[in-house]
Image (tube, coloured by chain):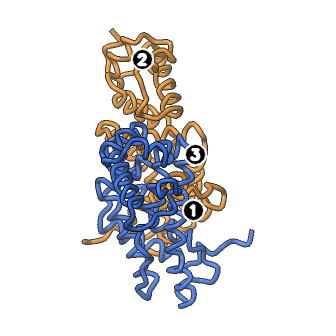
Chain colours: A blue, B orange
Amino acid sequence: MADEDGPGSVRPGGRTARVRTAVLEAAGDLLAEHGFARLDLAEVAARAEVGKTTVYRRWRTPAGLTADLLVDMAEQSLPRADTGSLHGDLEANARLVAKTLTDPRQSRLFRAVMAAASFDDAAAIALHRFYDVRLTEWSPCVTDAIGRGEAPPGTEPRAVLTAVSAPLYYRLLASGDPIDEQAVRVAVQAAVSATTAGVFVRSAT
Amino acid sequence: MADEDGPGSVRPGGRTARVRTAVLEAAGDLLAEHGFARLDLAEVAARAEVGKTTVYRRWRTPAGLTADLLVDMAEQSLPRADTGSLHGDLEANARLVAKTLTDPRQSRLFRAVMAAASFDDAAAIALHRFYDVRLTEWSPCVTDAIGRGEAPPGTEPRAVLTAVSAPLYYRLLASGDPIDEQAVRVAVQAAVSATTAGVFVRSAT
């Protein structure tokens, strides 16, 4: 039975895949609307028009469902940019982050998952894995820049990418300052400037 | 009646102040334990050993109570450092942020409030006001640096301070990467490097 396969074994176009798509969309909607604390598998099943038993059997808990949603989001997320320059690639990255964080559904969804991660280990692991996939996907932007002589050898890709995204997340989650064109520009320039200066070179210690 | 004063009119040492201290401590504990969605005024009153009526009359809603907790946290937060150098001041700031974000109660409390802010406007306003107070308190570190010739005229203090804190928040909330000595050092060096390069100078446009 296809239904007994794990979440990782989706056959695109099959019934299992269609069920997963509907359930994950409903789960994302409900997380964005009410947060993780009120995520209810029966409500997800009703909204997705899928049998409750299927949802309970396959995802078991709200944390399990949230974890699979993050797996799906990581799979669907856009590949790295390859513009030919570090500045161009980091700007593409910053624009993608800004677009996600200024989208009402997406930004509430991320905040809901971050809240879940502070109370649930499975959600935390899934959240960190999502960012790990993203940071790994975009790392070649930095290693390519090292190859082109735009960044010093030993520059840590993850530190550079964190420097680009972090000020935009801080605006969403902490200060409430706008995530606008100026914020994107400054985040990219600051990351490029610090990269060029060698700040992100892996330390020997 | 002191009880009819607003939350802003605390007389230190008075009964009103003692009640507020007990209630806010209980609210902070419960937020850190269970998150905003499960914050219940009756439970706060019981834990604080304060009459339920007092809590309902004075704070009215979980969002109102969370907002007052943030007012109190802003009032209690440490004054800016004044080490005599931009690097020293920003390092003190980064250490303070790292200490808060690696404290289990504090980090869960902040995540709970951030989650509340995505579903409740009053909580969002209170959260943004908290960061506004912090960013304003620490801004003289940057204006003093401009005065000493360590930063170009027109450097935006808020952008510099955001650059210092943001990578540490990103590690807590998104990537899960450790908030350690190395993370603090890199965040400070990146912010100083970009500041010196003029990245945070207010743009004319």
Question: What number is the disc on residue A121?
Answer: 3
Specify the farthest residue to the front.
A1
Mark 1, residue position: B87
Q: Chain of mark 1?
A: B
* Left or right: B137 in relation to B123: right
Q: Look at the image and tell me whether residue A18 can be seen.
A: yes
Amino acid type at circle 3 is Asp
Q: Are marks 2 and 3 on the same chain?
A: no
Disc 2 to disc 3, C-alpha distance: 28 Å
Indicate the position of residue A205 as horizontal and vertical percent values. 75, 68
Q: Chain of mark 2?
A: B
Amino acid type at circle 2 is Ala
- Seen at 46% across and 49% down, the residue is A65
Q: Secondary structure at mark 2?
A: helix
Q: Secondary structure at mark 1?
A: helix
Mark 2, residue position: B42
Q: Is the residue marked by circle 1 packed among few (<14), some (14-19), or many (20+) residues within 10 Å?
A: some
Q: Earlier in the sequence, mark 1 or mark 2?
A: 2
Indicate the position of residue A57 as horizontal and vertical percent values. 49, 45
Q: Give the label, 2 or 3, closer to the camera.
A: 3
* Left or right: A178 in relation to B14: left
User: Quarter holding the N terminus of chain B?
Assistant: top left
Specify the farthest residue to the left.
B205
Amino acid type at circle 1 is His
- Seen at 40% across and 81% down, the residue is A88
Q: Is the residue marked by circle 3 packed among few (<14), some (14-19), or many (20+) residues within 10 Å?
A: few
- Seen at 56% across and 78% down, the residue is A197
Please say if B169 is above or below B200: above
Question: What number is the disc on residue A146?
Answer: none
Disc 3 to disc 1, C-alpha distance: 36 Å
Specify the farthest residue to the bottom.
A148
User: Quarter holding the C terminus of chain B?
Assistant: bottom left
